[in-house]
Amino acid sequence: MEGIRSGAVSAHHNYMISGMLRPGFLVGDPGSAKGFYLLADFLLPGENTPRISGRFFDERGDMLLELTWNRLMLDPADCLYRPTPYGFHLSKSSGEIILETTTRRFPNGYITSFSGRLYDEKGVLKLDQEGSSARLVGNDSIMLTAPYQGCFGKEKKNA
Amino acid sequence: MLKRNRYMDRGTCLVWVFGDYADYFQNRVTLQLIAKGKALASELGTRVGVVVLGEDIGQYVMEYVAHGADVIYAADNNALKDYDVELFTAVAASWVEIFRPEIFLAGATAFGRELFPRIAKRLRTGLSADCVALEIDRETGAFVQTTPAFGGDLLADVVTPVMRPQMATVHPGIFRELPHDPFALAELIHPPLPNLPERKIEVVRRRKEKARRASLTDAGVVIVGGKGVGSRANFDKLFQLAELLGGEVGATRPAVNAGWAGEERLLGQTGKSVRPRLLITIGTSGALQYTAGIRGSETVIAVNRDHSAPIFGLADLGIVGDADRILSLLIEELNRRL
């Protein structure tokens, strides 16, 4: 029988992505100097704010921004980062939403969901909107069951 | 004869629990069964899995992981938004046929009592209802399900030697849940949904029953009255005592039949099971039908006029005396001290 999807789930915090809970995930390589990546980091008990990092592009492959652990580090396209009561949203200067995160708090845990559309440096769709949530396009994501220990592109270059 | 399939080897999770999250945080039976399932799974060298059906079920999935589930089998689907016995039966039965668990447990709640017989029928296997104990026989390896029989006069040990899974519903309060572990991780599996039958029931609206006081099954202190309490007026003193101790009141079948307490307070094989830190049982003889529901209590104090009453065999502290007099003294003393 085909169609069985499997992964891991945390008792503390998970991301709802592609219709499944995941404790953390990574698409692309944060260590690359220029390429697309999206890192939704694994949270340990005691942490209640999801850590999102990524280098995002528009549908033409032009770089929009680079975010490292919820902080806008590079912003060549004059994008806007705005915290919300439940997460944050990133929008283009035109106001068009790039990515929005929403974290729901339950008595004993948290679930973060996404909405928006993300493209890589070739303009290929990597994260798509599906109804009220988002799904990853392609099968190149890695699930994280521990906090990300790797480096980011800039750090790698400086190392 | 069951045919092997590749998921039987992959899914080394042979003890399953059905996730009954209705009225969650009051209804803890699924957590209790996960703990028991984990112990059974350990004896069988396997893992415990929880089946969770519905829509927007993430928080329940995470709770089950925190309380010991090794594997979650989940369907988060709008078609399963409202409980429908035919749909849930179809999904659970189809997943059993894929993964072939050895044991499948559910709480003996209104939900479990409706759903599990249908799943068992669909799978042509046995079901032991309202179990009060579950064990693996160390000599034979059989899964022994202890359940009241013949109207509750006997406890019967039931085994399902051939058909699988071995299914049982279990009274809430029989087993103790594991502590919440926020560091826990589990495997999450989304099996495919079968072709779902057409929904025949539409949920128009939901109304919650008026909130009662603390649940009897979760109370840390329980005061139980039996026929020996003597009268309705004396029975009302149990409520005073419970109030002073921050507890709840339970009743035996004769006390319920006498109209001193409602059916929702009934303890024992045909009622609820409790595991309080302190249980004071007053005017109860200690009949098996009743004691099956209190056997997990940490400390039991028994009050009875008859020094040979079987209840004293179960009690940590026994007081031979008149129920009315002892109750009055207890209330007076507590009023003085508190």
Image (tube, rainbow, N blue to C red):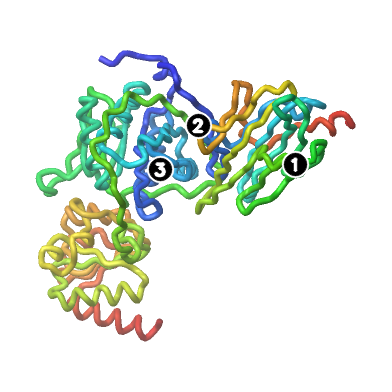
Label 1 amino acid?
A: Ser
Is B267 on the left or on the right of A59, as rendered?
left
Q: Chain of mark 3?
A: B
Looking at the image, can residue B48 be seen? no
Q: The residue marked by circle 2 belongs to what chain? A: B
Residue denoted by label 2: B187
Q: CA distance from mark 1 to mark 3?
A: 53 Å
Q: 10 Å neighbourhood of mark 1: few (<14), some, or many (≥20)? A: few
Residue B286's place in the image compared with B318, above or below, is above
Residue B30: mark in rendering? none
Give the quarter of the figure containing the N terminus of chain B: top left
The quarter holding residue B295 reads bottom left
Please give the name of the residue rendered at 65% of the width and 44% of the height, measured from the top-left corner: A50
Choose mark 1 or mark 2, whichever is in front: 1
Q: Which residue is mark 3?
A: B35
Respond whether the residues carrying marks 1 and 2 are from the same subunit: no
Residues A110 and A72: in front is A72
Who's the residue at 35% across and 83% down the image? B335
Contact (Cβ within 8 Å) of mark 1 with mark 2? no
Q: Mark 1 highlights which residue?
A: A93
Q: Amino acid at mark 2?
A: Glu
Q: CA distance from mark 1 to mark 2?
A: 41 Å
Q: Residue furthest bottom?
A: B336
- Nearer the observer: mark 1 or 3; the answer is 1
